[in-house]
Image: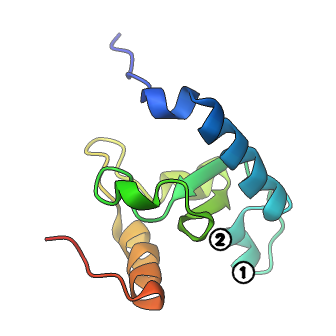
Amino acid sequence: MISKQVDPFYKTAKWKRKRENVLRRDKYQCQISRRFGRIVQADTVHHILPRDEYPQYELCDWNLISLSAKEHNKMHDRMTNELTREGRRLANEILRKRKIEKLK
């Protein structure tokens, strides 16, 4: 069995504080589910614009969203770690809103 390496960033005190603040901000509720009128507990904080492509926004509140594990899994293709169609839709929404150019 191959174990997945955990990015050291996610073990830093800075990330742990930010993650807790985002979950608290979102009242520990999945923000995607909330859009559809459902109250579901959030246990994950998702980078809307991926860290590997937009490292300068990795700790920006507006780039972080509380999600349930189920909704978070809809954002990433777990085999390639690329954003799914749903993940790209959310990222494009933020790119437009923030007037940020897409990376090529």
Determine whether 19 is above or below 93 in the image.
above
- Is mark 2 in CB contact (under 8 Å) with mark 1? yes
Residue found at x 39% / y 89%: 99
**Quadrant of the snapshot with the C terminus:** bottom left
- As shown in the figure, which amino acid type bears the numbered disc 1? Phe
- In the image, which disc is placed on residue 94? none
- As shown in the figure, which amino acid type bears the numbered disc 2? Ile
- In the image, which disc is placed on residue 32? 2
Residue 54: where, in percent of width, then height?
Answer: 34, 60
Residue 74: where, in percent of width, then height?
Answer: 48, 59
- In the image, which disc is placed on residue 36? 1
Residue found at x 47% / y 80%: 94
45 or 77: nearer the viewer: 45
Residue 98: where, in percent of width, then height?
Answer: 46, 85
Q: Nearer the viewer, mark 2 or mark 1?
A: 2
Spatial CA distance of label 2 from label 1 is: 7 Å
Label 2 secondary element: helix
Label 1 secondary element: loop
Residue found at x 48% / y 33%: 9
